[in-house]
Each structure stands twice: as C-alpha cells, then as structure tokens.
Amino acid sequence: MNDRHGILDSIANAFVPINRDGYKFVAGAAIATLFLFLISDALGWLGAVVTVFMAYFFRDPDRITPSRAGLVVSAADGKIAAVESVVPSRELALGPEILTRLSVFLSVLDVHIVRAPIGGRIVTDNYVPGAFLNAELDKASEENERRTLVIETETGEKVGLVLIAGLIARRIVTFVDEGASVARGERIGLIRFGSRVDIYLPSGSEVLAEKGQTAIGGETVIAEFSRDEDTSAARVAARSGLED
C-alpha cells in the first residue's frame, strides 16, 4: 500500500500547475496542433511537442520559503551567473554606493516565475525600454529591456530587483504594483522565454551564494542581513520618528 501511494504521489508531483499567463499559449498551441493533424501526422506530432513544451515552460510549482527573519532568497530559478560589486542602476534610486549584485540566468528550461526575495513594500517600480541582447552578457543589465523594482522591509533594508529581457525573452509581466506589500517568496512576475534577474543587496549583507550555483526561486537563501539587533532597533526607531 505504501509503495502504491509512493508511485501515485510521484506521478501527481509530475503534473505541476500552469501559471494563468500561460493558458493562452498552451490553448493556442493545442488548437494549432489539431489543425496540423488534419494536414499531416508529422506536423501534428510536432505541434503536440510544442504544446507540451508550452505547458512545461509556464509551470508554476509551489515553493517552501524559509521564514527566519533577515534572510534573502533567490528571486528566480536558474544559475547564479555573477556575484559582483557594482554601482546600482539609476532607475533603482538606491544611491551611488557600491552594492553586491547577484545575477541569476534563466534558461528556457527553468521555471520563469519571479518571486520576492524579501518581504516588504514595493517602493520603486520602473519600466525601462531597451535592446534584447543575450541575457548572460554583463551589459544586458544596462542595455536590455527591463523592469526595476525595489522592496523595502519594515526595518528599512532595501533590495533592488531587475527583471531583464533576453535574446528570446520579449515580454516582462509583473503581478504587483508600486505601493503593494509582498511576502518573501510571493510570486511577483514572469519573464517569457529565457532571461535574467539581478538582485541588489544592501550594504552589510552577508552573501551566502556563489557564482555557478543553481538557485531555486523562493527557496534558495542567497544572503542574510546584518543580525545586529541594535542596528535593527535603531532603524525601526528612525522610521517611527519619520512617520510621526
């Protein structure tokens, strides 16, 4: 009985929900496949493969996000292509200070749902038109079409997030707007067909990931804020004073 349930669970886990943004692509491919079968079996089976790929590409699995305070999780699935110190792009409005940037490259085989790396409020949301260079190139962060977001925690830490279109990716979709509150690991966007996500960490953060590592969006811990309780308390007090 246990073995039987184990097999059934494995089969069930293979069928991952599809994000609603992908419904029209899967439906379109399925309808096209029906017409292709009327023309040729070979074309029909080719259409069937495309339909299956569409369903696979837009898969939207649930994730178990760590709950400990101060952690920063990866915003996307993929390979960490770079961990470097840079001046953040001006669209983020994070100032001229050099910050650590982690870049996650998503291949067409990765889950393309983008998740909030921290919990907080979205204080910046900008769309920047641009080119469609290979997302693995460093200059893609500055030249490609992108969407920039900044999330601020209750204790004042700000994490910058840049969703970057790639050579194939031509559409960036966000599910949240400026002013919205998000939870760590919450779905906040989608980049279609290959892309890159840059994550800018506040100064003093301890980086816990490295270049070449495979990250899982919403689960893999990539950094941790300073655990200095006095510093956190001071930030809360300062914010309270400003609000008063």
Image: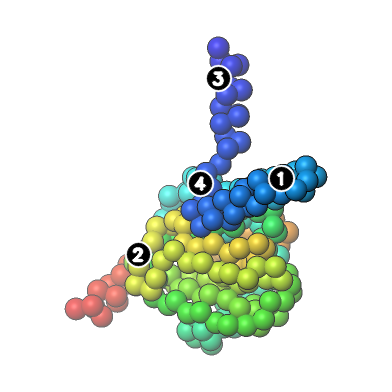
**Residues under labels 3 and 4: Cα distance?**
22 Å
Q: Considering only order in the chain, which callout, 1 or 2, is on the residue closer to the N terminus?
A: 1
State the CA–CA distance, disc 2 to disc 4. Answer: 19 Å
- The answer to which of 55 and 6 lies nearer the viewer is 55
Label 1: how many residues lie within 10 Å, few (<14), some (14-19) or many (20+)? few
User: Between marks 1 and 3, how big is the CA–CA gap?
Assistant: 40 Å
Q: Classify the position of the C terminus by image quarter.
A: bottom left
Mark 4 residue element: loop
Label 4: few (<14), some (14–19) or many (≥20) C-alpha neighbours in 10 Å: few
Q: Nearer the viewer, mark 2 or mark 3?
A: 3
Query: Is residue 117 placed above or below 100 in the rendered structure?
Result: above
Under tag 2, what secondary structure? strand
Residue 181's label in the rendered image is 2
Query: In terms of sequence position, does the residue under pointer 2 or pointer 4 come before the other?
Result: 4
The residue that mark 1 highlights is 38
- Of label 4 and label 1, which has the lower sequence position? 1
Q: First in sequence: mark 1 or mark 3?
A: 3
Check if mark 3's residue and mark 4's residue have beta carbons within 8 Å.
no
The residue tagged 4 is 63
Q: Residue at x 55, y 82 (%)?
A: 128
